[in-house]
Amino acid sequence: MFPDAPTPWLDLSTGINPHPYPFSPLPATAYTRLPEGTRLAELTALAARVYGAPDGAHVAAAPGTQILLPLVASLLAAGPAMVLAPTYAEHARAATLAGHAVEEVEDFERLFAARLAIVVNPNNPDGRVVFRDRLLELAAHLGGKGGLLVVDEAFMDVGPRAESVAGDVAAGGLVVLRSFGKFFGLAGVRLGFAIAAPATAARLAGWLGPWAVAGPALDIGLAALADDAWQETMRRRLAADAARLDKALAAHGLAVAGGTDLFRFLRAPAAAGLFETFGRHGILVRRFAGRPDCLRLGLPGDEAGHARLEMALQAWQGAGGKARIG
């Protein structure tokens, strides 16, 4: 689309932390030996502590949450499924792969009619948050009729953590997904977790089989999840970065409509023109099919990235972009 764009590209199309966790060099055994079961047990116990699950028996570790989506959907026999939309498209695709008849709905109340309901919380791409008490009400309702609520908390590390339902899975009827790579900035490590009642967590782990989490991912996950100081410092840094991005956008007449501290969501009539301007400057942002007025921007990771973004915004405004906001 943009053959004359300057390179390297500045990729702001993701919601991945641009400040990755600085893990230490890994021991040779991380590569030369099959992952030890005791290390996996350490990892799930640590994940339970960090995410607020009752204990490690409630956690199944996987090579990324993506692989968990169709497995979790397969916990129920094929039937009616609803996804609270608009959201991450892979949930609907994975539920369809599992045989469900999937409907995307925008009214939370409609989820009570489903057998399988899926909510991303905080939501991607707009940062919408459904409060914990409403989610627990829905989980109890679905569980009472043999259904299941899946809550994807991929961005809860930078969200309102009091609204997490990871600590409420013991009663059943609820599975919570947590992503490692987004907050820790290590998407290529491929590590994620399903949090559920012990029998459900064990069932998922059984489907994944032994050695599902690679040795390097185990070592990195154990180090990063145990580093409470880094996590708290990073939350403050990301909040400051997001505020800086908001200020830059506002200076050019663009109001943030939502998001989290890992991405910002814009809704403006001029979004298509803004996407084009960014592209010509070698900056990739996320646009959405069928929603031409929406964009999602990740965070620049350094001063050069902020400067490049500012240059593109100035060019857009100079071309009359601000006047097209309406």
Image: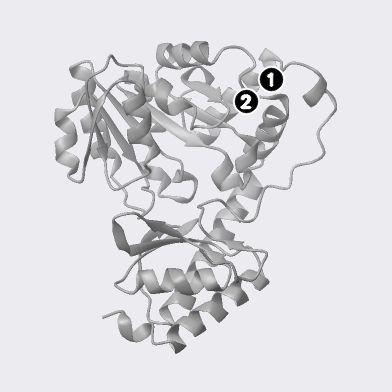
Circle 2 is placed at which residue position? Answer: 43
Total marks shown come to 2
**What is the C-alpha distance between the residues marked 1 and 2?**
6 Å
Q: Is residue 95 above or below residue 4?
A: above
Circle 1 is placed at which residue position? Answer: 39
Residue 86 rendering spot, x and y as whole percentages: 29, 48
- Looking at the rendering, in which quadrant would you find the C terminus? bottom left
What label sits on residue 240 in the rendered view? none
Image side of residue 111 versus residue 124, left or right: left
Residue reaching furthest to the right: 28
Residue 292 rendering spot, x and y as whole percentages: 31, 63
Badge 2 marks a residue whose secondary structure is helix
Residue lying at 18% horizontally and 17% vertically, measured from the top left: 145
Residue 242 rendering spot, x and y as whole percentages: 50, 65
Image side of residue 206 versus residue 112, left or right: right
The image quarter containing residue 200 is top left
Residue lying at 37% horizontally and 47% vertically, measured from the top left: 122
User: For mark 1, does the 10 Å Cα neighbourhood hold few (<14), some (14 to 19), or many (20 or more) residues?
Assistant: some
Residue lying at 54% horizontally and 73% vertically, measured from the top left: 280
Amino acid bearing label 2: Leu
Amino acid bearing label 1: Arg
Colour scheme employed for the rendering of this structure: one colour
Q: Is residue 182 above or below residue 221?
A: below
Residue 222 rendering spot, x and y as whole percentages: 67, 31
User: For mark 2, does the 10 Å Cα neighbourhood hold few (<14), some (14 to 19), or many (20 or more) residues?
Assistant: many
Mark 1–mark 2 CB contact (< 8 Å): yes
Badge 1 marks a residue whose secondary structure is helix
